[in-house]
Structures are given as structure tokens and as C-alpha cells.
Amino acid sequence: MAENPLHLIMNPQSIAFVGASNNPMKMGTMQALSIVKDGYQGKFYPIHLKEKTVLGCKAYAAARDLPEAPDLVIIAIPTKNVIPLLEEFGSIGTRRAIIITAGFKETGESGRDMEKKLIATVNRHNMRFVGPNCVGIINSQINLNTTVLGMDKLPGRLGLASQSGTYVTQTLHYLKKKGIRLSKAISLGNEANIDIVTAMEYLAEDDDTKAIILYIEGIRDGRRFVDAARRITPFKPVLAQYVGGSAAGARAGLSHTGAMAGPDFLYDGIFRQSGIIRVGSVEELYAQGWALATQPPLGGRRVGVLTNSGGPATAISYACDSAGMDVPRFSPQLQEEIKKHIQPHAAAGNPVDMTFDLDMPLLAITIPEIIMKSGEVDALVLHGAMGRGFMKEAYDHAHELVGDVPFAEFFKMFDRDLSGAYLLPQKYNMPLIVSSFFDREDNYTQAYQDNNVPVFDSPERAARALISLYQYALVKKRKTAVSPALPPVNETAANIISEALARNQKALDEYAAKKLLAAYGIPVVQETLTATPQEALAAAKELGFPVALKACSWEIMHKSGKGLIALNVENEEKLKIEFKKIQQAAGKAVPLLVQQMISGSREFLAGMTRFAGFGPCVVFGLGGIFTEALHDTTIRLAPLALEEAREMIADIRAQKLLSEFRGMPKVNTDTLALILQAVGFIALLHPEIAEIDLNPIIIEGAKPVVADALIVLST
Amino acid sequence: MAENPLHLIMNPQSIAFVGASNNPMKMGTMQALSIVKDGYQGKFYPIHLKEKTVLGCKAYAAARDLPEAPDLVIIAIPTKNVIPLLEEFGSIGTRRAIIITAGFKETGESGRDMEKKLIATVNRHNMRFVGPNCVGIINSQINLNTTVLGMDKLPGRLGLASQSGTYVTQTLHYLKKKGIRLSKAISLGNEANIDIVTAMEYLAEDDDTKAIILYIEGIRDGRRFVDAARRITPFKPVLAQYVGGSAAGARAGLSHTGAMAGPDFLYDGIFRQSGIIRVGSVEELYAQGWALATQPPLGGRRVGVLTNSGGPATAISYACDSAGMDVPRFSPQLQEEIKKHIQPHAAAGNPVDMTFDLDMPLLAITIPEIIMKSGEVDALVLHGAMGRGFMKEAYDHAHELVGDVPFAEFFKMFDRDLSGAYLLPQKYNMPLIVSSFFDREDNYTQAYQDNNVPVFDSPERAARALISLYQYALVKKRKTAVSPALPPVNETAANIISEALARNQKALDEYAAKKLLAAYGIPVVQETLTATPQEALAAAKELGFPVALKACSWEIMHKSGKGLIALNVENEEKLKIEFKKIQQAAGKAVPLLVQQMISGSREFLAGMTRFAGFGPCVVFGLGGIFTEALHDTTIRLAPLALEEAREMIADIRAQKLLSEFRGMPKVNTDTLALILQAVGFIALLHPEIAEIDLNPIIIEGAKPVVADALIVLST
């Protein structure tokens, strides 16, 4: 496998920096300063026309003056100078760049042209680069930081790829305060060369990165993204925040990095298909990512909850329970063991509520250990361990009573080695999630955070982090989906399409559509196309009454509510009447489909639509009148492995309709999965098809049968 | 109106405290210290058997030694001593108490008995009290704090009533750090006397409280709660967090305050009925409550978004848009005005993204003011205003470059009067919500917080706070619901019930049930009860084929899927066959209902169930097979005003089914509302009815008709 182009960008032996001076009011200077100050050990070559030294390092006037071709050049100069500079570095042999400079595609037409020239230049020199319009990268393992602010000095475990530079710079201080440490971070900017997929792949290969977080405003190559993510998520958790699906959001995305925004629904489906856990805010992205990066994998769904107060105990239990986890009542033996340590009226049943108690080692070490080694839980959520923070409050409040000793001395009484608390997850190979209303000013919070136990500032957030661990455990359990081989093109189907195109049709008529579907093995309703009442009657007799009658013409794409359908036509007399009525409603002579009446009250839909950058996508959901009323639908990129089709079917909220239910048998979901897979195949085999709509697919007994179909052609 | 009993508890002229000493390791001492130290100006009488002074105040050996009957006694002594002590204070004339002491109902049988005796004692003395098993109260307007930790000295605006003491104590430090200030707080404990409804009513009357937040684990008197909240929410926002609806949560609730937990679904309905905004975590409770307590009311749904970076701009827009708010594109004029101030490629269209810019007055004052006075938005969300926090980071990073001046001196260059920023909401009577990755260490964050502009530590949280303002604006717009007068008891209905009870029936049969419903004006399907095929045929001919046949016996409560129903019976021959088949399926001779076939593909349900403490509750939702598959249902307490019934109908996700849709007319929701109201009336008029289930209510054309009904009797 070829080396990921980010490898050298993240681990250069030498860096040239263009755009730094000794003026601290310039962003470039601040960025170069990060490289110099945060402890990067490689060679650093500032390029400056006039200065002899920049930030204490010998400066060079131009690339050709350098003693070697640096592994990486970082560029933070005015837009118009970028291309000549890349030309220069390319010609001395530098093959990697970070282009901080903005003013390209994100600014409109002329910027877009400039970006194209930029790409042509680097391609000529076989270079790879991050940006333009980004803030750079962080590699905490080698203390390399190219952003404007200093970074946390402790090595991190969380890898970030972000389509917003803010989340690689403005938040560094915030992350320090939350005790969250990045292993690697990449601000992607316009992704003119290295994109989010390459960044994700790099983070997946990086051993120091234990979990990956992605801030996404738009994915360009959906298929590549899904293929890569599906490979990664079984062994490394990936979380993503996607914003940009709304009208206003999309506008912001456009003006920001020129990213293509797609609908929210599509991204939701892609994330599910990829095994990526989606979060709703940047703080969840960091915090839940940090929990996944630090905690041992969750081995089951049983949660122990331990607190010193009832509110948080209740809130944590409630949140876990609502998310499908279990807060099991402890065995009498375990309760007895816990009761030895807590006040008589305190609750030991799980949640364990010690009630207010200042014996912190009990809350943070003794009882957690009893619970973790009991074998009765798979994870522990702990609320209320606090030391210096609380003591400081109490001291400020009551220092006169304690003889006015200085706080430091007062606190010595309570200060202790906390390794017994923070080493528990390793010792029992079990996640520990902590909640505390005290931040890093408290020695418990600090000790936990500095030793890879995540601390959240509210009980519900702690619970939510555990829930992401649970979600990831489910992702790991997924069946591996092997991308299926496409079947051969079906001749009948190809002929139906080419004939329709030859007649300038924008769609197939229903009869032709079902013929095409049937050619790929999709079960469709029995039907006959008829032109006269006599033909219709003959067909109805052959099929057996009652039948359905439908106008059939490619020009009538949506028939319902227009008098173009008659259902449950019971006999000859009614057939004649309905035949006439439909002709009248159509306003002209149209052929009529005579269909077998399928009886079944469960209706689903399958469909296909194409998105730029993503190709054909398959949709599954509730059908019939509930399609628009409930939007209980899900989407995936084609082609679909059968496992993927089954996951789609399991996605819809109305799961119960698929099971044995009110005297109806369990739906044959194998057939349903084959239909979804076939829809994807058809889309890939016949690019002339723009959209497919099978709605309703009626469940007749247990068997799905396509009762109506629309196939729209590309024009 | 009688004075709320909390008024004197929150505003006592004199307080006796029993259970404090000079030992700082005792909770009682810490609580008394809060009263003495936080600035309470009334008289304070410690009661202590041995000490002469407690915390520097003259101590008294017993109540009878006091110079006066104190307005309030606070009790923090062992459980067994509480009742004698109350007896003592009752007899000297004290009429209010806060009972901190635990060990009552929450501990089981003997505690429950003790609590009953406690209640009897105080009733004899005509006393009112908060607790037991609570941490006390805070009234920041008179600097009265009875909790164990010191409180924020600035007066607050947010009123809290909490069924967990933690949220009135452990979080005080957290709140200080978040810049959130309470006006009043009440820890309710076991609610043996004063309950959450009385607390909510008190906070509603309190002028210093601008918004009310409730932490709820269980409501005892649902009807009183809803009635009170419905009166309050039109003029003061109320937010609630409810936990306890899950199995594990309920168990925690029980061991905590002995509160009765009800299902989540019920509380959701009650909050909607009351106009209470529900939140999912305690941090949202505080933070969104603080936004509502500080910001002017939202006048519309148009949001301006202003940032210095693209990620937050996109995230805020996305969140607002997803919640039904609008981030409108600014007019060309407004964009032009903004463009004068920002960099050429920055976005002015809304969201306004200035891109990274250190001209903070521009971001925090100039552009916000341009946007707020434009008339094009109803609120502004601002991200990125930062001063000292960012400068400190930059200084730490680059201080060598700035000549090593001390930070304080360096920062003077940037320090400025920020009143132009934080006074904007008042000036334009428009909400301003701020997001910043810097906390109170930053002078912008601090200035905003100290002057009643809420600051959130992530863009999405800021957006969510604005969304609660939007939710509250919708609550204020609600039609006032006047509790309807009950109709008289219908004789026919009463007879049906008493006859069924006389026959020891556990339910009415379907025929009787519909007769009862029809007696209260509910439209039911036309039907005849028949015993023989001949009678059935006569009935079918009268109604007209096709008809439905159903076994009719109170012992068959759920018919579907058992062969006890035949639909679309088209003719005499089929009727005879189906008649026999149903008899066979029933296994004995049962009367058969012959019903008119109602055709309509939209099905709803209405129902009634009773919850202890809440009385009869009316349910509305999707009917037919979707009832259990989709749980698209909502609930309210009976009786229902028609406005309330209409709100229920508007609650369901499948709204679209109610409108004109796929050739079907708009559903007659007036009739639907009348049905829901009647169901509530029936439950109140006939307490012998335990449950009602009208499912499906089929929409025939536009008209709802009850096609099946089950009425279960109390036994």
C-alpha cells in the first residue's frame, strides 16, 4: 500500500516556513512561533527576503538558498505569490506543503481559477498538500504545531480532521481546560489536494490515535469516504459532526470553504453505512471522542451508577436506560458488600447513592472497585468525586472555624494519591466515566483527566459519553459487508430503456418499469396492459376478480388522488364503469393496466436517487400514504451488500411492522433486502436511469410485492 | 388569595437553627454558617444545649428560652428528635419550618410512619414546612442561604425548585463559573407539606424571578400542577427536567425522595399541556433557564448569526434552521453596510463570518448594532468575542516577541469598556446569545455574564438556548384554555355501565361501548347486533353491502388477527360463509355485529387511561396497525378544553395526514377535538370506567368515525 501523503506532512524532518517575520501581529509569525516554541525537534528554515533571523532562527531569502530541500513547506503569504513559490519549492525537490493562505475557491470565480492553476502546478511537481485556506496541523507526538496558539504539552490520543480551522485553533484553550488531548489534528481548508478521506485514512493508520473525530461541512467523494470508513470503523471508532444540510447551513458552508453541501438525510445514511457515530455538536465531538479514545471497549450493556447524590444518580440511570442500556439491580451479595461501607439509609441497589459523604476514597476507589470486580456490570459511571474544588469552597466559607490556617495547609489533610481511582479502567479493562461539577481546579478532576479518564461537567453528558461507547460496541459487532459483484446487464431491461429514450420519454410507463424490475428478479404484481374494456375484462378474468385498474402512460408519473386508479374492482359491470371513468379522468384514451389486487396492510417503499459526488443512493422506508407523512426512511450508497440492505431495513422506526404482528406473519426481509440490492444494481448498470420509485411495496402475507413503480430517465 | 406559605419561609424576619454547633465538620454548622456569613440581615437564633455561642451568635438552650417566636425554624438534628422539637416550636408560635433531617419516607416503612406523625404534629400547630430530607433554600435578594456552601453575591433572576438537593448545593460553584445567578432556590426534599406546585406558584409570584426551572422526579398532584402551570406559563417561562420515567430511573427516584415516578410519556404530555419547556439535562435546565431569565422576549423567528469563524457560523445556522427558525439572507443594503467593516472575502449575507479578526469592538459592538437595528432579525447569536482569554494565550505564546512586558501591561492595550456590547439587548429589546470557547477568565465572557447576557461554551448550545426562547414565544402565543364545564351524566350511558357491572363484566361489549359513546355525541359507525345469519343478512341489506362482521362479546377485548372479524363482505353468500367462520373461530355462539364498511386510509386513535395522582388522561395518536409500530401518540389530563384537544391533534408527527393530502380532503379536526373532549368528559362522569380505546377512528372523506371501541370497567 502506498504511503499516505499526510505521513510526511505530519512527520517532516525539516520545515521551511514562508510568511513569518519577527512581527507578532502577523498570523504567520504566530504560527512559526508555535513550531519553534512547542518543541519541534526537526530543522526549521524561515524564508524571509530581508530579515537575517526570524524568531531566533537563521532566515533564507529563497528556496534555492536552503542547504537542503525541506520535507515540508508551510505557506502563509498573499494569494498571488503562492503559485510562484510552490513552483520554486517544487523545483528544488520539496514534495509536501501546507497552504495556509486563503483567497482561492472559497471567494468565487477568480479564486476558483487560481485554485485550478495551483493544482496544476503541484501536480507538475508531484507534490501533495493540505489547504489552501487552512490553519495547519498538529502532531503532539513530535510536538509539531503549526497553528497560531500553543498546544497542550501532554501527548494525546484523539485524532481530528476538520473542515473548519476554528476547531484546530480557537478551541485549543477550551480543550486544555476540558483535559482533552489531541494526538493529531488536520485543518483541511479547501481540500484542493488532500481531502477528508485521506486525512481519515491517515488517522486510522496512526497508532497514537485511538479514536477519530471529523468535523464535516461537505464530502466530495462519497463512495471513497464510505469505503474507507467501513474499513476503519471495525477497529477504530470514528465520530462525526455534520452541519450544512439546511438551507442556511449550506449557504454558510459555501461562503466558508466552498464545500459542497448535501442534505442531512444523505449524510445520516452515509454515516450509518460507514459505522460512524454521528454527534450533534462540536463539544460532543470532542468529549465523546475523548471517551472513546481513552476507555477500554465496552463489553456489554450493563451499567453501574455510583454517586453521592440522588439527582445525578437518577439522571444517569434515566439516560442510559433510554438509550437501550441496562442499569441492573445488584445481586443481594453485592448490595451487602456495598452496604458495609455506606450509611444505613443510602441506596446500594444500583444506582448506588451514598448520599452526601466526604469520604472520597470510598466513593472514588473502594466502592468503584467492589462494583467493577463483581462481574455484574460492563461499565461504571461515577458522579461526585471531588477534593480541592469542594474543599476550597468550604474553606472560603468556613476558614475562621478551622483556625485560619492557610488553604494549602488545610488541604494537605485531604490531599492523597489518586492513582487507585484513575487506574481502575486499566485494572478491570472496563470503561469508567466520571461526572463532576468541579473542573480542573479540583484535584480529582485533574488527576482523572491527566490519566485518561474522561470527566464531564454534567451527569447527563457523562451518560451520553457512555452511550457512544455502547454505540461503538454495536458498530464493532456489525457483519462485514463485502462489496458485491454487479450482475450482467439484462438485455430486456436495456431494450426497454433504449426504446423509451428513442421515443423521447422522460420516464418509463408503469408496465415497462415493472418489466424492467422483474428482469432483475424483483417481485412485481401480476398485470396486463389493455386498450379496450374487452381486453381489460379478459385480463381480469384471467387474473381473477377483484382487480385494480390504472391508467398507464409515462406522462402520468403520479396517479394517486386524480381518479386514474380504481381499486377492488369486483365484477364485470364495475370494471366497465371504472374503465370509462379513468379514460374520462385522463382526458384522452390511455392504455389501462389490469392488476391483481394485492391485499396487505403493510406498505413499504424502495427507491433510488443520485447525488453529485455520491452516485446512486438507495432509499428504503414506510410506503403508501405514510411516505410523506412520516418520513420514516433511510438511505445508503449503491451497490449494497446484503448485510447493508438488512441494516437499512433495521433502520426504520416502524420496526414492529416487519415482525409478526397482529396476526400478520413476519415480513420476508430477505426478499426485501434483495429488492434493495437489485435497485442499487439497476442504477449502476443503467446510468440512463435518474430515479426509481417502488411505492408501495405491499406485504402480501409475508411476501413483498411491488404494486406500483416509477422509473425516471435522465434527460 | 391566601399568601403562599413559602413567602415567610423565604423572607423570615427571624430564624432559629437547631443542629448547628461550632464544629465545622457538621453539616448543620456549615448551613448555619451560610446564614451568618452570606449576609442575612434578620435575627438569627442558634439553639444548642451546651454552647453559649454558636458561630459568634448567642445560643439558646431551647425554644422556650427565645426572646420571640421566630418566623422560621431550621432543623438539622437526628430523625427521632424532629417531632418533639416541632412540637416545642409549634407551641411557642412558630409557623414555618425547614426540615433538613433525613430518615423519613425515603427509608421505607418505619420512616413512612414517622413522616405521618410529623405531618400530624405540624397540622396540629397549623405550621407549614419544606422537607424533610432537603438542603434548604436560597433567597439571593435578602442574602439568605441555608445550604452548606456559599452563594454568588450578585442578585439573580432564575428561580429553582428542585426535587434533588444536589442541584441547590453541589452546583453552586458550577453556577458561579457559568455566570448563572439564582434569585430563589428551594430544595423540596420529601414534600411532606410544601410541594413542587406551591414552590412553582411562589416563584411565579416573585418579581425577582424572571424564569422558573424545575427539577422533577415525580409529581404527586398532576391536576393541580397542570392548572397552576397553565396559569403561570403565559407570563413567565417555566422549564423542567423530568427524570424517573425509566425502570432504573424510577428505582433511583424511589430510594431518593420516595417520589412517585410516572411514565415519561405522561410527563411529556403534561408539560405540553402546561406550556412548560422540557429539557434533557440539568445543564440545559440552568443554561436555557438563564437565557430565558435574562433576555427580552423573542419577537419572531428570524435569527442573525455573527461570528469570526466558519465552523460556528455553520453550526449555529444549522441548529436554528433545524428547529424551525429562520436565518434569512440579509438585504443587499444591510450586506453593503456590513461589508464596509469586514475583510473583502468575508461573508456578509447571514451568517456573517468576519473570518479571523482581532478588532473585537467591530465583532462585539459595531456589527451587532448594525444587524440589530436593521429590522431584519428578531435575535442575534454571536460567536467569538474574546479578549483577555485569547490575549493571555497569545501572550504566553509570544511574550518574548512583545518585549517581555508583564501581561497586565500588555493587556491594557486591549482592555476597554464593554458596556456597548452587553447593553445591546436592552437597547434594541432583542435577545442576544453569545458563544465563546473562553470562560470567565476572559473579560468579554465575564462582562456579558455579569450583565445578564448568557454565554455558552459551544455554538450549538448558544443556538439551543435561542431555540428555547423560540419555544417560549410559541407558548405565549397559545390560546387560553378555559377549563370546560362537564356536561350532565347521560342516563343511557349510566344504565349501560350499571347493567354491565351487574353482570360482573370487566368491559362493555363493542356494541354497548359505541352506544355509550354515541350518547355523548361521538360519531360511531352504523351497526346492528345480530344473533343469526338471517338477522345478519337483514342488517346488511339495510346498511348496504359491503359490510363488516365482528364477533361481539365483552370477553373478546382484542379481536384482530384471530379470525373474529371479516371485512368487505360483499354479498349474501359471503356473509353466510363469514358468519359461520367467525362462530367457529370464537369457539362458541357469539352475537355478531354487522357494520357499515367505512372506507378511508387514514386511521387515528383516541383513548383514556388513569394514572394515580393524575386522574383520567386522554390519549390521541395514529391508529390501526401504526399504533404500536410508531407510537405517534400524545396525552393530556382530562377535562380538555377544545384548545387543548386541538393542541393534542397538532402534536403528532404525522401532521400531514390531517391536511389535504394525495387527493384526500383535510380531516375535520373540529370533530376530532370534540371526540377527544368527550372521551375526557366520559372518564370524569363515569369513574367506573377504567380505560377507553377508540381504535381505529377512520377518516371517511373528511369525517372521523369510530370504527371500533373498547371500554374497560374498574373491577
Image (cartoon, coloured by chain):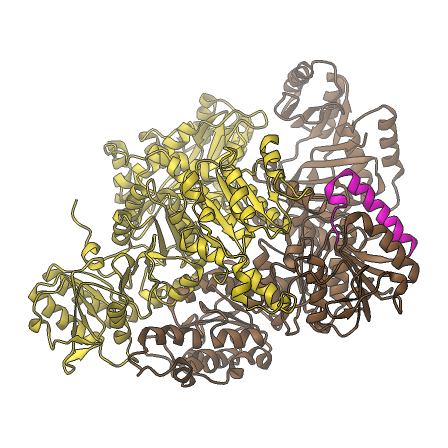
Chain colours: A yellow, B brown
A415 vs B337, left or right, is right
Residue A406 picture location, percent across and down: 55, 69
Q: Quadrant of residue A574?
A: top right
Magenta-drawn stretch, dominant element (helix, strand or loop): helix
Considering only vertical position in the picture, is B21 above or below A454? below
- Per the image, is B444 magenta? no
Depth check: B464 or B163 in front? Answer: B163
Q: Which residues are magenta?
A: B101-125
- Please provide percent x and percent y for residue B308: 40, 72
User: Which residue is more in the foreground, A406 or A712?
Assistant: A406
Report the front residue among A182 and B473: A182
Name above or below for residue A215 compared with residue A594. Answer: below
**Residue A521 drawn at (x, y percent):** 34, 28
Q: Kindly identify the residue that appears in the image at 63 percent across and 19 percent down.
A: B574
Q: Position of residue B64 (x, y in %)?
A: 90, 62
Q: What residue is at 72 percent from the left and 30 percent from the top?
A: B543
Quadrant where the image shows the N terminus of chain B:
bottom right
Q: Quadrant of residue B531?
A: top right
* Point 74% across, 24% down: residue: B552
Answer yes or no: is residue B356 visible: no
Q: Is residue A379 left or right of residue B140?
A: left
Residue B87 in view in this figure: yes
